[in-house]
Amino acid sequence: MRLDPADVALCVADDGPPTASGARPVATPIVQTSLFAHPDLDSLADALAAEHASHVYTRGQNPTVEALERKLALLEGGEACKAFASGMAAVSAVLMGLLEAGDHVLFVNHTYGPTLQLAEHLGRFGITHSTVLDVGPEAVAAALRPDTKLIWLESPGTMLFRLVDVAAVAVLARKRGVLTCMDNSWATPLLQKPLALGVDLVVHSATKYLGGHSDVVAGAVVTSAERLRRIFYRAYLLNGGALAPFDAFLVLRGLRTLPVRLRQHEADALEVARYLETHDAVAAVHHPALREPELAARQMAGTSGLFSFELADAAYARVRRFIDALAHFRIGVSWGGVESLVITPSREDNAAALAARGIPPGLVRLSVGLEGAELLIADLDQALSF
Ligand SMILES: *Cc1c(COP(=O)(O)O)cnc(C)c1O
């Protein structure tokens, strides 16, 4: 993992305004207030006229949330950031803030399920979408339509963790005047900087690695100041997915250990993935550093702890028996926390639906936490022979 020392310092450093004696707290204070009272009516009127840049009401701006936004904007190399009450609030705000009836969204690669469900709903408002799973730039170019306004990228993609050549897609999108947005939750800004690769917007589920301890739900959007203002007034303020000050504090605290957590997640996930590659009961391992090392090295500074593999015996009963036999991997949704997690998209009766989405049966997703690779490999070993 090649982390930028300036990024590491930015994650770790934190402080608040000086006290009366001139000393400074080393953590951001939680400004737990719903509204801000003004010294006179003109002051309030001025604040209301520019609510994206002033303190009126915590559904708009709040100092604790702004401390987080400044850090995320710097880490992503973007002009401006807005933090949201969840990753999905951030996704919704981008789609609802930037699209009009008659616009089309092209989803490239396997996309987070609820994002696609939201796109389905937006059909009711005249916004259409399609998906292209062949992530080669030619296939992406061919899937563009005259009404395509936005290309939505996930790299690595959900479930199979395939990579998109981000710079190549950004170039063809710019040529066609199409916006690009990357869901960068998997890599975090420490491992991948989509804006530097030519992408226009970045969204995050900060619930995952940024928070990192499975104790907060949060999201973020980073883009140009102008585009963010549009999203602020057309979606953030009105949709109401505002991040609470305490939750912003939890994400700020999570960020302080993000570099050291990511180093350990990468090392342990690679060790677990390499072990699985050698096991007879495993048909394939889907880890970007093992499957697409060149592209991974070109556009990412390392890899995180989430990947998947396929059981050779893909019968649902086998998948269930394997998962239920695990002792240290907890069974649950989400990922990116300190505890290791396991999940499968397979159900007793959904093989055809998975096949239609290009998801192989017998797929198991692991979020490798911080318990240590040795313990996790021993756990997988006993469950694979169970
Ligand atoms: C979890 C997740 C989201 C949604 O984030 P929430 O914080 O759960 O709303 C979006 N994209 C990806 C890739 C995710 O894993």
Image (cartoon, rainbow, N blue to C red):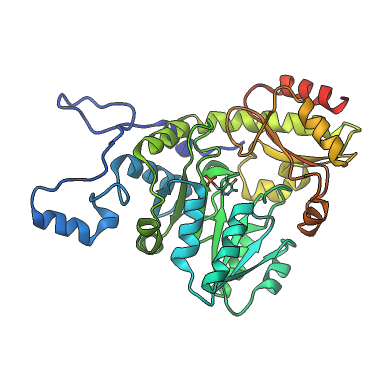
Tell whether 33 sits left or right of 220.
left
Residue 9: name its quadrant. top left
| Image quadrant where one finds the C terminus | top right
| Number of residue marks | 0
- The residue depicted at 53 percent of the width and 77 percent of the height is 102
| Image quadrant where one finds the N terminus | top right
- Kindly give the residue lying farthest to the bottom in the view shown: 146
Q: Where is 322 relative to 68, above or below? A: above
- The residue depicted at 35 percent of the width and 61 percent of the height is 229
Pick whichever, 333 or 189, lies toward us: 333
Tell whether 155 sits left or right of 189.
right
Question: Could you tell me residue 251's position as x and y percent?
Answer: 44, 36
- The residue depicted at 53 percent of the width and 41 percent of the height is 190
Residue 167: name its quadrant. bottom right
Question: Could you tell me residue 145's position as x and y percent?
Answer: 63, 77
Question: Could you tell me residue 362's position as x and y percent?
Answer: 83, 42
Query: Visible in this render: residue 197?
Result: no
Tell whether 19 sits left or right of 249.
left
- Kindly give the residue lying farthest to the front in the view shown: 349
- Kindly give the residue lying farthest to the left in the view shown: 40
Question: Could you tell me residue 38's position as x and y percent?
Answer: 13, 48
Query: Visible in this render: residue 275?
Result: yes
Tell whether 136 sits left or right of 185.
right
Pick whichever, 165 or 275, lies toward us: 275
